[in-house]
Image (cartoon, rainbow, N blue to C red):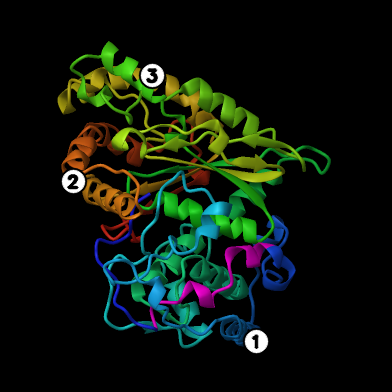
Amino acid sequence: MAVLTGLSPPISSSLITSPSSLPSTSYYFNNDERNCHFLPKKISKCSRFSPISAAVRKRKAERAQSILYSIQPQPQMNPNSLNSSGSGVSWIRNEPSIYNKFDCHGQSEGPLHSVFPTTSAQVSSVEDLYEFICAGPLIDKVGLNPEKVGESINEWVLCGSHLCRLFQLDELFLTEPQKIRIYHYYIPVFMWCEQEISRHNSQFKDKDDVPPLVIGFSAPQGCGKTTLVFALDFLFSISGRKTATVSIDDFYLTAENQAKLRESNPGNALLEYRGNAGSHDLSLSIETLTELNKLTKEGMKMKLPRYDKSAYSGRGDRADPSKWPEAEGPLVAVLFEGWMLGFKPVPVEVVKAVDPQLEIINKNLEAYYDAWDKFIKSWIVIKIQDPSCVYQWRLQAEIAMRADGKTGLSDEEVLDFVSRYLPAYKAYLPTLYAEGPKGSDPNHLLVVEIDEGRNPILGS
C-alpha cells in the first residue's frame, strides 16, 4: 500500500538489476516444472519437518548453494531504467506484466528498501543465509526452529530467489534491509500460511469440497500489508496454487453513496470521506466473501470488486466492473487485508474520551463482525508501536501515485486525510493488540510487530 522509502537508491550495478536482464513474470508461470521443482506441490508436504544430521544438512546446503548461483542472472545497468530524477529504478513499476497477473488494488508499490546503505550485504553462502534465517524474530512464532529451517533450506532459497526477481533485486548482493524483509518477514509468514492451510484442509475428507481458508491481515495504513499480500499471492501462484486477494478498500461505498453518508452526518469529519466504519458496502462484502468460499473446483470463476483511489482527485470511487479482476477456482486461500480488520466496539466512554465523533463509528462497528471477521479463520495482526507513523507512510504512498502519473492527494490533503483515521487507531488498536480480533483462535493468530522501517522486531 505504501512506498517503502522516502529516499532514492544509489545507482549501483550491484544493487540494480535491469528488467531486460530478468525473465518476465510470465516466464515463471509458463515454466512451473522447470523453476519450481524444489517447491512442494502439496501443502501437506510444506509443513512436514524432521530432525536431520549435520551431513544431510551439509548436502542440502551444497545443493541449495548450487541453485542459488545457477538461477541468478548477471546484473546489468540499463540507462532506460532510470526514473526522471535519475535516481534509480522502481522494483515493480518497471515490470508491468507483474500487475497484469497480480492485482494490488490500483496501488503502486515503491522500493523494498527502508534505508539505502552505501555497501551491499553479499550472500556468500547458504550457511550464512541459514544462520541469518535462524536469527529472525518470527522463527519461533511461526513454529520453526533451526532443525526445521535446515530441513527446508531449499524452499527458503527458492522462495527468496523468486521474491528477488519479483521485486527486481540482486539476490547475491542484497542490502541488510532487503534480506530482513525477505528472509525475516515474507518467507516466514508464507510458511505460516502454508501450515494454516494444511491444518484447514485436514478437517475435510478426501472427497469433500474444501473451501479456501480466509486469512485476515489487520494492519495500519502504509505499513506494507499490501506488499506482503502481493508477495504471498505470488509465492502461492508460482508453486501452482490459486489464491484470491481482497481488501476492505474494495468494499468502500461508491462516491455517490459516500456523498449521501456525508450529508446524513453533517459536521462529522470522520464520515466526510471514505475510511471509517459506516463507509463500506457491507452487503457487497458478504456477497463477495460468500461466493469466494464456493470457488472449490476448476472452471469456477467470479469477478472481484475493486476501488479506484485516484478517482475524483484522490477521493476515490468504485472501479468500473469491466475492470474488476477475475478469481478462478479451486482456491486454497483468500488473502483479506485491511487497516481496520478485527476492530470491535468498545465502551462508549472510551470512544468519547478519544473523540466524540467516534460514537457513531463505534455503533457502526457492530455490523462489521458478520460482514467481515466471521469469514476469517486465521489471522495475521501487524502491530505498530506508534500510530503517528501512518502519516509518513501514507504520504509516501501518495507521492508514489503522483510519480506514476495518477491523481493523488497533496501533502496537506494527506495530513487531513490521515487525521480522520487516527481517532480510530487510538480507540481500537489497544483492544485489538490485547485481545485479538473477535472470535479469533489464539492458536491461529500470528502477531508481527514492526518498526518504523516496516521490518519485524521481537516485540513484547
Q: Which three-letter amino acid code belongs to the residue tagged 3?
A: Asn
Density class for disc 3 (Cα within 10 Å; few <14, some 14-19, many ≥20) is some
* Foreground of the two, 365 or 139: 365
Magenta-highlighted residues: 14-29
Q: Is the residue marked by circle 1 packed among few (<14), some (14-19), or many (20+) residues within 10 Å?
A: few
Look at the image and tell me whether residue 30 can be seen: yes
- Determine which quarter of the picture holds residue 68: bottom right
**Can you tell which of label 2 and label 1 is closer to the viewer?**
2
Task: Give percent across and percent down for residue 249.
Answer: 42, 35
Residue tagged 3 = 257
Pick whichever of labels 3 and 1 is earlier in the sequence. 1
- Badge 2: residue crowd in 10 Å (few <14, some 14–19, many ≥20): some
Q: Secondary structure at mark 2?
A: helix
Residue type indicated by callout 1: Arg
- Amino acid type, callout 2: Asp
Q: Which mark is residue 59?
A: 1
Task: Please tell me whether residue 132 is drawn above or below residue 429 in the rendered image.
Answer: below
How far apart are the two marked residues, 2 and 1, measured between alpha carbons? 54 Å
Q: Is residue 360 magenta?
A: no
Report the disc number at residue 411. Answer: 2
